[in-house]
Amino acid sequence: MDIKEIQNLIKFVAKSGASEVKLEIKDVKITIKTGSGATETTIVQAAPMQGMPQVAAPTTTTPVTQQSAQAVGEDSNYITIKSPIIGTFYRKPSPDKPNFAEVGTEVNIGDTVCVIEAMKLFNEIESEISGKIVKVLVDDSSPVEFDQPLFLVDPS
């Protein structure tokens, strides 16, 4: 499969409205994912055999929007509390109790700010900084990834 055929395939998938297309021909695997205005293309190819011409894989990048750049600028003076584990984020110790931390809550080092459930174990997440909670970045009962931002804290 040459570069022209790959480019035509990408254009066809983008126009078709399909969200994902996987194509496997001999030792070449192509996955094309579309959505939200950006197209992601992954091409996996086995090591080229001797005498075979190499084809450069097309790459696509998503441009940084002005809105995300402004958000980084506004939040640069805040410190982020991140998830140390993968699991489910809970803002309260139990359904009938109040939230550990709300926007405007003053937290100190060692204060519990949330609970993350991982494999039926509830892990209390403690603040590593002192300051005021400015923003809660995750909805209650949502899955979180390792190192995902949970809270923004103003240390001043």
Image (cartoon, rainbow, N blue to C red):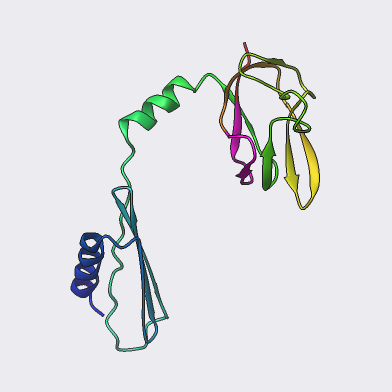
Measured as percent of width and height from the top left, residue 116 is found at: 72, 40
**What residue range appears in magenta?**
138-151
In the displayed structure, would residue 133 be above or below residue 138? above
Q: Residue at x 33, y 53 (%)?
A: 35
From the viewer's side, name the closer residue of 64 and 132: 132
Please, which residue is most extreme toward the top here? 156
Q: Is residue 89 left or right of residue 13?
A: right
- Compare residues 20 and 57 and report the one nearer the observer: 20
Q: How many marks?
A: 0
Residue lying at 22% horizontally and 72% vertically, measured from the top left: 3
Name the side, left or right, on which 80 lies relative to 93.
Answer: left
On the rendered image, what quadrant is the N terminus found in? bottom left
- Give x and y (percent) for residue 32: 34, 65
Q: Which of the pair 137/98 is nearer the observer?
A: 98
Q: Place residue 25 in its image quadrant.
A: bottom left
At a point 39% along the width and 84% down the height, the residue shown is 27
Residue 150 is one of the magenta-drawn residues:
yes
- Left or right: residue 118 versus residue 11 is right
Is residue 87 found inside the magenta-colored segment of the image? no
Residue 19 is situated, as x and y percent measured from the top left of the image, at 35, 60
Q: Position of residue 20 (x, y in %)?
A: 36, 64
**Which quadrant is the C terminus positioned in?**
top right
- Quarter of the figure with residue 14: bottom left
